[in-house]
Amino acid sequence: MEKPDFIALPSHNQCLELMEAHGMLPNIREHSFRVMEVARFLGEALAKAGFDLFLPLVTAGALLHDLGKTPCLGTLTNHAELGAGILEELGYPHVAQVVREHVHLDGNILDPRPLREAEIVNYADKRVLHDAVVTLTVRFADLKVRYGRTPEALARIQATEVKSRVLEEKIFAPLQLSPLDLLRVNGERGNGAQCAH
């Protein structure tokens, strides 16, 4: 898919205001900042490797990926869809699509098309447990304990884990990095850098 000439993005302050306006809990905010750091790290590495990624979209999508999470706690509402809907109403359809796909990607992970911004954010989210960068094994062990309460839920989590491992291979194949290199982001605590330039 060809990138449009203009992509509307919220400013850094608008990102923070949206988090506040939608009651994002402090722990979810910290998680979001860490996902943003991982996504930006990967996005920059992939851009250096020649991938055509719009890094401000990666950053904004990562920062706002859980915008709908707090209102959905304790409900069956899909937080990715709620967050995407909020962003669409505000005129940010590209950010909305990244948010929509942060739990489950649209399409086939084996699709030969180039890596997309949504894939970077989806993977970054799968690598952050609370506010720490961890391996996929650790993250999915936690997800199975917290959310795998029924056989159906556990099967969904296991299927997502398989897809995440395929995505991990797709992301790291062109890089001179390994998935374990992301763990060093834990030592580089950021300050919620700008979500758009």
Image (tube, rainbow, N blue to C red):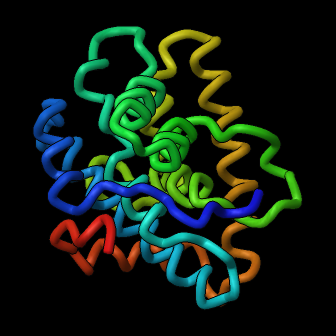
Rendering quarter of residue 18: top left
Residue shown at the point (44%, 77%) measured from the top left: 41
Who is closer to the viewer here, 95 or 23? 95
For the N terminus, the quadrant is bottom right
**For residue 44, above or below residue 186:** below
**Image position of 184 (left or right of 17):** right
Residue 48 horizontal/vertical position (percent): 60, 90
Viewer can see residue 140 = no
Q: Residue at x 47, y 41 (%)?
A: 96
Looking at the image, which residue is at 21% across and 74% down?
Answer: 189
Q: Position of residue 62 (x, y in %)?
A: 40, 55
On the image, the x and y values in percent for residue 17 come to 13, 46
* Side (left or right) of 164 relative to 125: right
Considering the image in quadrants, where does the C terminus appear? Answer: bottom left
User: Depth check: 110 or 157 in front?
Assistant: 110
Q: Percent x, y for residue 146?
A: 39, 26
Q: Quadrant of residue 82?
A: top left
